[in-house]
Structure formats: structure tokens, C-alpha cells
Image (cartoon, rainbow, N blue to C red):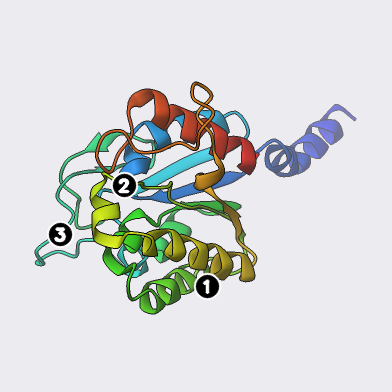
Amino acid sequence: MKNKYVLLLFLFLPSISLAFRKPTLLIVGDSHSTMDFGSSMAAQLGASFDVKRYAVCSGSAPTFLKDKVCPAGTNCPYRCGYTTPDGTFNKVVPSTFPGVNGMLSKQTPVDMVVIALGTNDGNNSCRTPSGAIQKMRDLIGRLHGRACFWVGPPAYGPGTEIYRVCGNTYDQFVSLMRTAVSALGCRFIDSREIFDPQTGKPIAADRGIHFSKRLGTVWGTEAAKSVR
């Protein structure tokens, strides 16, 4: 009889292990996600999810459509750093760093994906948006129906480099992004609607294209609340 109970416990162990497995969540992002925004979002979500963070400075939707972000033998354009899946920052992107297809096959199973892209897409394509918006659609298509959140880029007002390049077309680009992403069933978190508790105004970059530690943490924390 004792052996029988031991056998039954052994048979049920896989299902018990699965029941207590944290869902795996990928964060896919650009330089914001290598910094305080990404760190705070990952920390907030880490209590509920097994978070794997893939972020590349200067990244955009086309970056992660590649099989490898910086294939061996090519001149890698992403030279300002990246994060490993555990969130460790390193400078030189390795030739093995995967695009979204590789992430999904390496981190199995993947239950949810948070994409935090758009600043570079808008800066590069704000005046001719159709191609960039299609790349975003293509990126969502690679997720094959997994639960998806897209954290859109923040507002950039007068005095910033992006505003100098794009003017009001940047805000129009983000609105087009929101419409396209939402139409594919990926919930869009509009960072233009996240407010700084100290000023009561929408968060805005205060370090050129980037954020101070305080504001980056506010952004990541509030975005994580929406995901939860």
C-alpha cells in the first residue's frame, strides 16, 4: 500500500509542478528597456511572472524580425548595449542574440509578451509611417496568438531631438501605431497617458531621448500595473 501511494505521488508530480509554474513573460524592447524603465517593469512583474528581458539599444520592430539581431560576419549597428534575459546589461551584442522567433523557441513555453518599442520606429519613420507600422504588425504576427501587450513610446515635446525631426508627425505616428496594434489583439499601453505624480503632467523625457532614474521608474512601474 505504501508503494502504491509513492507511485501515485510520482505520477502526479509533473502536474503539480506545472500548476505552480510561473507563467513566462518576455519583455522585448529598445534602450528604454535596458534602463530604469525596463528594470522597474521587470521587477514589478517578477512576482507573478518568470520575466525574460531582451532589449537592444537603438532597437525597433525590424530589429527583432531578424533571425539574429547581429549575425556573425556583419557590421552590427547596435553598439550602445543590450540586456541578457536576466536583465544584465552588456555592451557588445553577441552574434547569438535572437530575434523574436529565436526567443520564442528558446524560452519555452512563452505565455505572454510585452513589446516596448516605438521611439526609434517613430524617429526613423514619422513622416513615412506605413512601412514601419507594417513591421510592427509583422512582429505581432510572429507571436502566433500569445497574450500580448505593447507599451507605446512616451511623448516628446518641443526642445527634444525627436520633436525637431518629427514635429507633430511623431504624435500622429504613435496614434497610428496604437490603432494598428490594437486591431491585432495586442493591448496597447499608451505611455502618453502615464502621468508624473510630482507634476501631474504626462511623463516626458528629461535626458534627451531618455529618462532620469526617477521618471524611468515611474514609467516602468505604471506600465507594469497595466500588464498585471
Residue at the right extreme of this rendering: 1
Label 1: how many residues lie within 10 Å, few (<14), some (14-19) or many (20+)? few
Label 3: how many residues lie within 10 Å, few (<14), some (14-19) or many (20+)? few
Q: How many labels does the image show?
A: 3
The residue at the point 65 percent across, 65 percent down is 185
The image quadrant of residue 204 is top left
Quarter of the N terminus within the rendering? top right
Q: Distance between the residues labelled 1 and 3?
A: 25 Å
The residue at the point 56 percent across, 44 percent down is 193
Residue 99 visible in the current orientation: no
Determine whether, in the image, residue 213 is placed left or right of residue 112: left
User: Label 1's element?
Assistant: helix
Amino acid tagged 2: Pro
The image quadrant of residue 103 is bottom left
* Mark before the other along the chain sequence, 1 or 3: 3
The residue at the point 26 percent across, 44 percent down is 159
How far from the left and from the top, in percent, is residue 211?
33, 34
Label 2: how many residues lie within 10 Å, few (<14), some (14-19) or many (20+)? few
Amino acid tagged 1: Gly
The image quadrant of residue 129 is bottom left
Q: Residue under label 2, please give it.
A: 158
Determine whether, in the image, residue 215 is placed left or right of residue 188: left
Q: How far apart are marks 2 and 3 (CA)?
A: 28 Å
Checking the image for residue 77, the label placed there is 3
How far from the left and from the top, in percent, is residue 75?
9, 64
User: Label 3's element?
Assistant: loop
Checking the image for residue 141, the label placed there is 1
Amino acid tagged 3: Pro
* Mark before the other along the chain sequence, 2 or 3: 3
